[in-house]
């Protein structure tokens, strides 16, 4: 049963803030006589309330994290008992997509029934980081992703797992699978499909050779921005970007910056680094790239088409069924009349909807 926390009354809050002649949080009270400050008394009091609530939030967050640590220990004991009985090789999975969804749904309902200005999107963003910290406290978690820093795979990984995790970049999708299998990383994030460009063939090809499992799915809208180290450069002379990103934003660039020189880089990371070395230059990249390299967004959403990318989260084990699952199946067929038809007929018989079908070479023979 959840404990019922009663919100302190206004008078109680003000009384606590008055204690010891300090603002909440142990900070000296702001004063109208402070040098260089001319805040109104009302503004000073409102800031003291903010200080008080910040202190209470941090206190409650720490209490929550202590409970998360206890949950991690309990999971460890339960797993040890199961291994002793069945000689299971399963590892402790602290990231549970189904549990994450339940928490998001719960806090969204609580927020909807609580008067206040917080939107559902804001609550989910806040709790994404709370969940990230909780998972990492239960068990240090490392996430591998495809591509250099600030790639869209990196963006997808941080969107799902938050800022508390350790992230490792891989140039080869096969290396991600190998690292998951060896236990060098907890999960791997690999691109599988783009709504405009279709399937990621490299990911599909390496998956058919691996025994690793698809643990979860990430879908995110693809958004590219124009990034600069100056909020308003007087004249943009050069645009840096990877070949893929420049191609996906080519119409916008021709329309808005027709006179700028376009320079192709090996990666978004390199493009962002070049901006700091060149005057009047910008880079095409994600919000994550801007945050990582200290660049401001001059223009947002400059991609030519609205696009969504899909990623797989790879693990050693499967997530238990939730009743709202997708299933990814790979199989090979004999080269005979009606072979594919007979397989597809089985899905129709069982009333299973197929959302996507891809054909890939087996690698064992030419055709």
Image: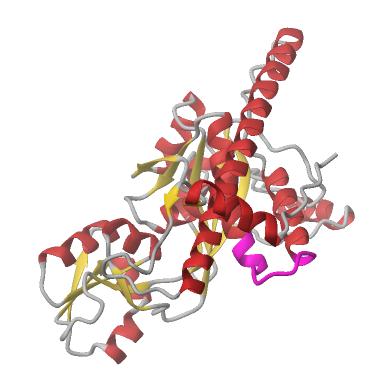
Residue 249 in the image, given as x and y percentages of width and height:
35, 78
What residue sits 33% from the left and 51% below the top? 149
Residue 10 in the image, given as x and y percentages of width and height:
69, 61
Part of the protein shown in magenta: 112-123
Along the horizontal axis of the image, is 183 left or right of 319? left
- The image shows residue 121, relative to residue 358, as above or below, that is below
Q: Is residue 357 visible?
A: yes
Q: Outermost residue toward the top?
A: 84
Q: Is residue 359 visible?
A: no
**How are the colours assigned in the image?**
secondary structure
- The image shows residue 32, relative to residue 325, as above or below, that is below
Q: Which quadrant is the N terminus positioned in?
A: top right
Residue 141 in the image, given as x and y percentages of width and height:
50, 34
Residue 88 in the image, given as x and y percentages of width and height:
69, 16
Along the horizontal axis of the image, is 351 left or right of 28? right
- The image shows residue 229, relative to residue 313, as above or below, that is below
Closer to the camera, 108 or 348? 108
- Is 118 magenta? The answer is yes
Along the horizontal axis of the image, is 196 left or right of 28? right
Q: Quadrant of residue 246?
A: bottom left
What residue sits 47% from the left and 51% below the top? 22
Closer to the camera, 272 or 343? 272
Closer to the camera, 8 or 322? 8
What residue sits 38% from the left and 60% below the top? 288
- Is 3 magenta? The answer is no
């Amino acid at each position: 049963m959840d404990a019922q926390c009663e919100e302190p009354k206004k008078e109680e809050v003000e009384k606590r803030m008055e204690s010891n002649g300090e603002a909440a949080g142990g900070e000296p009270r702001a004063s109208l006589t402070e040098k260089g400050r001319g805040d109104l008394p009302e503004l000073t009091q409102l800031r003291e309330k903010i200080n008080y609530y910040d202190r209470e939030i941090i206190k409650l967050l720490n209490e929550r994290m202590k409970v998360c640590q206890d949950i991690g220990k309990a999971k460890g004991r339960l797993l040890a008992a199961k291994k002793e009985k069945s000689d299971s090789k399963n590892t402790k999975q602290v990231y549970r997509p189904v549990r994450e969804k339940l928490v998001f749904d719960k806090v969204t309902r609580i927020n909807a029934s609580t008067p206040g200005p917080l939107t559902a999107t804001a609550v989910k963003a806040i709790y994404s980081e709370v969940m990230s910290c909780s998972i990492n406290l239960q068990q240090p978690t490392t996430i591998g992703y495809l591509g250099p820093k600030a790639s869209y795979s990196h963006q997808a990984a941080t969107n799902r797992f938050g800022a508390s995790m350790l992230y490792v970049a891989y140039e080869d999708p096969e290396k991600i699978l190998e690292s998951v299998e060896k236990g060098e990383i907890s999960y791997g994030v690999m691109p599988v499909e783009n709504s405009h460009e279709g399937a990621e063939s490299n990911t599909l090809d390496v998956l058919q050779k691996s025994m690793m499992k698809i643990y979860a799915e990430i879908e995110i809208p693809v958004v590219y921005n124009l990034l600069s180290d100056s909020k308003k450069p007087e004249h943009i002379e050069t645009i840096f970007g990877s070949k893929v990103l420049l191609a996906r934003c080519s119409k916008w660039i021709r329309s808005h910056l027709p006179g700028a020189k376009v320079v192709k880089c090996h990666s978004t990371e390199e493009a962002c680094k070049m901006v700091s070395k060149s005057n009047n230059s910008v880079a095409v990249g994600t919000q994550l790239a801007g945050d990582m390299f200290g660049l401001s967004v001059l223009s947002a959403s400059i991609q030519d088409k609205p696009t969504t990318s899909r990623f797989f989260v790879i693990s050693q084990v499967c997530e238990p069924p939730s009743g709202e699952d997708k299933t990814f199946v790979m199989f090979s067929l004999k080269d005979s009349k009606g072979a594919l038809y007979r397989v597809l007929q089985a899905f129709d018989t069982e009333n299973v909807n197929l959302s996507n079908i891809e054909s890939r070479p087996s690698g064992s023979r030419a055709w």
